[in-house]
Image (spheres, grey):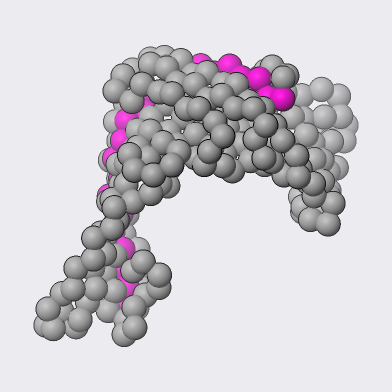
Amino acid sequence: MALAASAATVTVLAMPASAAQAQVTHLRSNGTNVSAEWTTQSPGNVVDTFVSATAPSKGAATLDIFSMVAQVSSEGAFLGGVQTTVQVTSGFTFTYDAKRLTKASVNATNLPARTCPVDEFGEEVASECEATTVSLSATWTGVGPISTGHTTDHYSTSGFKMVVHSSGTSRDATAEASFNGQALGGLQWASIGTYRDLKTAICRIPGGCGEGL
């Protein structure tokens, strides 16, 4: 099931004094998400690219891209590499079929991105990061049946409790993409899905439990 964060509708209710002045906050969100990952290997190198696009029912769509060109030893040990990251809410088009999950596409040129070297311990060398731009063209085609899922999670600590109800639909997909003009090969997985979340937070801490709660 494809789940993703998004803009949410927030409702705050003040409870009566008998409830120890509890503040109850409801956050609702829903939308459509597509994602996919591609990995290719050659002697001494592994290239991994992940793409995810989310369109909430309210607010701007988001596009996340992560690409790592890694150097590896003959034994498969990670020796370092270069990673490129994108996280934007504009500058791209995202089309999808939210009802039947049949097709989706993302297209963008000259997206602002950040490229950073990564050392052999997986740590980003921030002093050597550079701003750059990237392009992406990707399509998804749904295959197989549409599945549905429902989960309920509970989180609590002294004076605070949160209950998260999540539901959605998901469909496996095939996906093709080019990144900076280069076709991506080695598709690992791809999916098209919808999500609907309801988070209920109950706060009994004087002064509140933090921003938005």
* Residue 154 image position (x, y, % from top left): 31, 59
Position of residue 18 measured from the top left corner of the image (x, y, whole percent) = 11, 82
User: Does 110 appear above or below 104?
Assistant: below
Q: Quadrant of the C terminus?
A: bottom left
State the residue at coordinates (86%, 24%): 43
Counting from the top left corner in percent of width and height, residue 63 is at 54, 37
Residue 30 found in image quarter: top left
| Residue 160: quarter of image | bottom left
Query: Number of numbered discs present?
Result: 0
Residue at the (66%, 20%) spot, across then down: 178
Q: Is residue 118 visible?
A: no
Q: Is residue 56 left or right of residue 46?
A: left
Question: Which residue is at 72% across, 19% downward?
Answer: 181
Q: Quadrant of residue 151?
A: top left
Query: What quarter of the picture does the N terminus occupy?
Result: top left
**Which SS type dominates the magenta stretch?**
strand
Q: Does any portion of residue 133 appear in the rendered image?
A: yes
Residue 90 relative to residue 71: left or right: left
Is residue 162 a member of the stretch shown in magenta?
yes
Residues in magenta?
159-180
Magenta stretch holds residue 179: yes
Measuring from the top left, give residue 29's x and y in whole percent. 32, 46
| Pick the front one: 125 or 90 | 90
Q: Residue at x 33, y 39 (%)?
A: 57
**Of residues 122 and 82, which is closer to you in this image?**
82
Q: Nearer the viewer, residue 191 or 179?
A: 179
Task: Name the foreground residue: 151 vs 141.
Answer: 141
> In the figure, is residue 129 to the left or right of 141?
right
